Image (cartoon, rainbow, N blue to C red):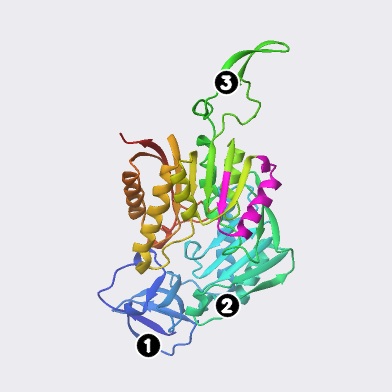
Amino acid sequence: MTKVFLVRNRRKRLEQGHPWIFQSEVERIEGEVTPGEIVEVVNHQGHFLGRGYINPNSQMIVRLLTWNPNEEINQELFTSRIHQAWAFRQRFLQGIRSCRVLYGESDFMPGLVVDKFEDVLVVQILSLGMEVRKEWILNALLDVFKPKAVYVRNDVYVRELEGMEQEKGFWYGESETEIEIEENGLKLVVDIENGQKTGYFFDQRENRSALAPIMTGWGESHGIRMQEVDDEGGREVRPVDRRGKVVKNPFWDGAEVLDCFTHTGSFTLNACKHGAKKVTTLDISDHAIETAKRNVKLNGFLHRVDFVVANAFDYLRDAAKEGKQWDVVILDPPAFAKSRSAVKGAQRGYKDINLNGLKLIREGGYLVTASCSYHMSPELFAETIQEAAVDAKKVLRLVHWSGAGIDHPKLTGIDEGDYLKFAIYEVRSRG
């Protein structure tokens, strides 16, 4: 078997469980190199470190599949790994029918992502080593899940960096490309053909549920109080407004919410589920707003949601100038920094939306904010939010901080797993 020798003075990432080897870490290669084939990785002294597949045309030259010298890389291994990944989700998300069932490196299958939408699987193959083992992958998926259909979303640029073409379409079976799923007790229609990435972002499942405590308890700040009033059956305690009129809206105690970058409307749905009085739902994409509207209608929340097609940066800035106010502002933008060189620009973008978002929050309200840019570290993201708070003359109290959900497990030796940052801050004025 071809051997890849690593340089002496390298960072000991492999020993910490990281599966990636870069060109700069390779001292020499002994044996014939065939792109996509399995090679043995050894240290500068020739001691075994692991086995994985090689692609000499990629900066990430080797991705490890095993650290065990006695483990064969074959169909059985692929089936076992995928079975273990599904068992992990079933253990921690009991009864789950739709989720990320295989998360690349974190499930010891680097370069492979699989999402499950009811009985349809959506697959992304991101590396040449996985591409040449497509048959093993499909066999394993059919064996473990017995799906109605398997759809590939290989329409991502990273494949070209690995020397592969982009593609999408059914790999096995057939189904509708719009699939209704359930998450957090809510119904959503997911577009696996044209939606972003694989069609839906499962990584925010638990974060969406975290909205629950901040969606009610706003009646008093809206000028509503409980008061004894005359009713047909006598005197009863009912909610009344500043004019003394009985409030008939059943969600009188709910928050007024602004949800920016809504995509499929998932945060809006969770806000409504947990009692929001009114949600303004915004996205720059007509398609996204139509999808969000469809999902809101599907759950019976249409009368509580206003939809806006607009650039969030412009909308936030204009709304701040107009003095508009909400109890809760949600900011869940796409990745601003897709490379290390883009971090400075991304930081300005995050500061801009959070600065103006903070200006729109009523005293004692909440900022819900996220970043899915890996190159934006948790420390830098928190620092950027604090800088925005200083400029907005606000004092923040952190009440919740988290990352990706349980179906996106993180290996402790891989910093790249820290891509998602999610926070909820209580917002108060300074001075």
Question: Could you tell me if the residues under marks 3 and 1 are in contact, i.e. CB atoms within 8 Å?
Answer: no
Q: Is any part of residue 401 visible from this angle?
A: no
Q: Name the amino acid, label 3.
A: Arg
Amino acid found under the numbered disc labelled 1: Glu
Q: Earlier in the sequence, mark 3 or mark 1?
A: 1
Instruction: Calculate the distance from the C-alpha at mark 3 to the C-alpha at mark 1.
Output: 85 Å
Please state which amino acid type lies under the numbered disc 2.
Answer: Gln
Where the C terminus falls, by quadrant?
top left
Measured from the top left, where is residue 310 in percent x and y? 55, 55
Was residue 296 drawn as part of the magenta stretch in this picture?
Answer: yes
Where 72 sits versus 86, above or below? below
Which stretch appears magenta? 280-303
> Quick check: 126 above or below 353?
below
Relative horizontal placement of residue 151, taking residue 39 as reference (left or right): right
Q: Nearer the viewer, mark 3 or mark 1?
A: 3
* Residue drawn 40% across the image and 62% down it: 416
The residue most toward the left is 9
Q: Earlier in the sequence, mark 3 or mark 2?
A: 2
304 or 40: nearer the viewer: 304
- Residue that label 1 marks: 30
Of the numbered discs in the image, which one, if any, rests on residue 166? 2
Which mark is in front, 1 or 2?
2
Tell me the number on the disc at residue 243: 3
Q: Is there a contact, CB below 8 Å, between mark 1 and mark 2?
A: no
